Image (cartoon, helix red, strand yellow):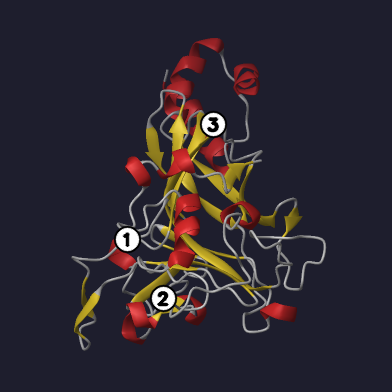
Amino acid sequence: MLYKNSAIVMLVSLVAGCGSSVTSSEIDRIIEPELTEALAESLETLDQEIKINFAARVGSEDIACEKMESIVAGSSNVNPEFTDVRLYVSSFSLINSAGDSVPVTLNNDQKWQYKEVALLDFENGTGSCSNGNPDLNNVVSGTVPAGDYTGVEFTIGVPVGLNHLGIDGDDAVSPLDVTGMNWSWQKGHKHLRMDVKGWNLHLGTTGCELVDAATETVDCANSRGNRPTYQLDNFDAANNTIVLDYLKLVENSDLAVNADNTPLGCMSGSNDSDCEAIFNNLGLTLSSGECTDGNCSALQSWVSVE
């Protein structure tokens, strides 16, 4: 019996070290049948590594740092010329077959990921994106308990607890210290920016007030969070990609016109008419910055599973 238990421990360790690539049928052939049930119970306690892939598109084409002559976007059919495409994503969970939400623990590489937030970067610092940098990232990595999962849930934006930290000074930490994603006039981070020549889209929390600059204390009691959370079904991290489609996000926006006396494009202002269609397509209510009827997924179509 002692030998059998030791064999289970050794095999479980081997499976864990190999990234859980051994199938159940292979396990059955390796060990005695009576040990299979005990081994399966042990495997259920292990974590599995996952990678969640993203793509940024304009219709069927990947976003490019140049004038995209074959694509027209917005209600006035503008050829988009992207200058920046980056966003923070956070609070990932996978949905299991019972419908339960199981949190994903992100790998803290402190380059692209820190605690529960990750930065996706689709600009390469060339062409029309020359103000950016060459580093790219379209993957979020982490671990979840071993299991069968059929959906994913995540938020676009920096969580409340991190939105005013990590920018500079002693607490600076990547990816929260990325200059282009610092929203200084709103005292936090841009959750998302998708900028084309002549029309910028910056999504971020608005309405926070600086209380003490020395301690970086901010009062956000009357703020608009502007963090859409999406749940996507029929998602398998091993085989699927989450697609962000700029064409659908701006399909009701006129990218050739800017509302009078407002910033260029949409800067998340509750009184900016340029933001109305954008927020509708995000699934957010413009006045409150919260998910419309408590469900951002129901009204959005710009984020999908491929």
Q: Which residue, given by chain and number where applicable, does mark 3 sit on?
A: 11
Instruction: Tell me, yes or no, whether the two marked residues, 3 and 2, touch with CB atoms within 8 Å.
Output: no
Q: Position of residue 39 (x, y in %)?
A: 48, 23
Q: Height in image: 113 above or below 83?
A: above
Drawn side of residue 284 relative to residue 58, left or right: left
Q: Quadrant of the N terminus?
A: top left
- Amino acid, disc 3: Leu
Residue at the far front: name it.
Answer: 260
Q: Which residue, given by chain and number where applicable, does mark 1 sit on?
A: 225
| Total tally of numbered discs in the picture | 3
Q: Quadrant of residue 157?
A: bottom left
Q: Nearer the viewer, mark 3 or mark 2?
A: 2
Q: Which residue, given by chain and number where applicable, does mark 2 sit on?
A: 173
Q: Nearer the viewer, mark 2 or mark 1?
A: 1
Q: Secondary structure at mark 1?
A: loop
Label 1 CA crowd tier, 10 Å (few <14, some 14–19, many 20+): many
- Amino acid, disc 1: Gly
Mark 1 and mark 3 lie on one chain; the one further toward the N terminus is 3
Real-space Cα distance between discs 3 and 2? 39 Å
Label 2 CA crowd tier, 10 Å (few <14, some 14–19, many 20+): some
Which of 141/210 is in front? 210
